[in-house]
Image (cartoon, rainbow, N blue to C red):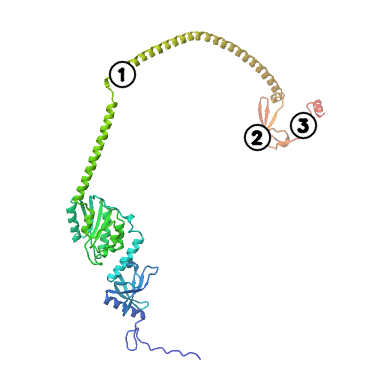
Amino acid sequence: MAPATPRQPAARGPGLDQDGTSVLSVSQLARQARLLIEENLGVVSVEGELSNFRRPGSGHWYFTIKDQGAQIRCAMFAGRNRAVRIAVNDGLQVRLTGRMSLYEARGDFQLIVDRMEPAGEGALRAAFEALKARLDAEGLFEDYRKQPLPAHPRHLTIISSPSGAALRDVLHVIERRFPGLAVTLIPSAVQGDGAEAELVSALDRAGELDTDVVLLTRGGGSLEDLWAFNLESVARAVADSPHPVVSAIGHQTDFAMTDFVADLRAPTPSAAAELITPTRTTLASELGALQQRLHRNLEQELRYQSAQLTGLARRLKDPAATLTQQIMKVDDLDTRLLRGWQSAMAARQAALGSAGKSLGLLAPARRIARERDRVAAAQRDLHRAISGRLTAQGLSLTGKARALSAVSPLNTLGRGYAVLMQADEHKPVTSIADTAVGDTLTVALSDGSLEVEVRGHSEDSPFASLDPALTDGEKA
């Protein structure tokens, strides 16, 4: 049996029920609920315990904020959670600021978080301890990183609020103890939302100055008031400073993260100024000690130089006696020089006379006469050799001419013979097979050549009727 077909409802207007009330889709209802929540609640702040924290690969955070009576789903996107400066985990008491909304795909009521911060002193202290442990593990608190303060600084850079009592205390101590110290103030907020960026910027600017010491200071306050000096970015900026940094934050019982990474921690701003600047008494004492050392060194140097002078005086001779000795030495050298010159001249003259005699014995006139006779004899021998060679070559040439004439074809042509050649190729014709009727041939005679045309072929020899005896002899 076929299943019954359900009855279709009667046709109504679009999106209306039987009473004429608008009928919404699930998506439309969820969208209207989201808009209603966002428009009426706006930006809210809520405190509670963080739980179910998740951090997927996208970098967004998803978690729940709860108290004893309720819980709300939360989402904090990557662009916002990068600004969170605390270690986030389940059980942390936090204060969240954001916008209430509705996740339409699941119908979840949720808070879109823009800012997260610790809730209460305990949470701040936990975040402080967590950051301290992490920076300590990186070695930022180690003594080998600490730079010593100069004993006599010439330039001090102060980073503080220009209107704070800490700055006035520092300047008062400097004026009293070391008034010649040059001071540069880089003003910065020391608490509030903009304090972090201003402190980091001020520390970067101080690193570019030609300064001897950087003092980072502010007056006392609650942990929340001092929190800017507990932020990781500020602590790392202090650690990266190329100049020694003194951290003086709050009162003696207050500790900030900058105290641990700085090169020196002072319990108060005034104590920091005293640690940086020497007192007049200390300077006077150091100056007296330097004067005593200088006096002792001068006395020692004078005694040494005096001893040196005494030794040189003993070694110094009478200049008159030295001059007499030098005069006598010059006279002796002059005499020796004159004698040497005279001896050299006599030797040169003797050598010149000997060379003249040798040159006379080697007079060129005699040698030229002998060489002239030799040349004349050689010329005569050459003429005889050339004449004999020419005679022999002439006889040889005559014999070769006779032999060549005997075999020359010109003699044959002179006896009435001729040579046939192809007119265009100049090849000799030795048989009637080499020609065709109509060919043009060149006939070479003893006194010239003829151009002839072949008009026919015959195998009869034209020499048969000329001389029978010759013909018979040839046949024989």
* Residue 122 place in picture, x, y as percent: 29, 70
Residue at image coords 68%, 21%: 400
Q: Where does label 1 land, which residue?
A: 325
**Crowdedness of circle 1 by 10 Å Cα count: few (<14), some, many (20+)?**
few
Q: Which mark is residue 461?
A: 3
Q: In which quarter of the image is the C terminus?
A: top right
- Residue type (three-letter) at the residue carrying disc 2: Glu
**What separation in Å lies between label 2 and label 1 (alpha carbons)?**
116 Å
Q: Which of 405 and 447 is in front in this view?
A: 405
Q: Nearer the viewer, residue 424 or 409?
A: 409
Q: Which mark is residue 460?
A: none
Residue at image coords 59%, 12%: 378
Helix, strand or loop for disc 1: helix
Asked whether residue 126 is in view, the answer is yes
Q: Which of 51 and 3 is in front in this view?
A: 51
* Residue 256 place in picture, x, y as percent: 27, 63
- How many numbered circles are shown? 3
Q: Which of 328 and 57 is in front in this view?
A: 328
Helix, strand or loop for disc 3: loop
Q: Closer to us: mark 2 or mark 1? A: 1
Upstream in sequence: badge 3 or badge 2? 2
Relative to residue 420, is residue 94 drawn left or right? left
Relative vertical location of residue 374 with respect to residue 163 in this rendering, above or below:
above
Upstream in sequence: badge 1 or badge 3? 1
Residue at image coords 22%, 58%: 271
Q: Which mark is residue 425?
A: 2
Relative to residue 450, is residue 80 drawn left or right? left
Residue 46, quarter of picture:
bottom left
Upstream in sequence: badge 2 or badge 1? 1
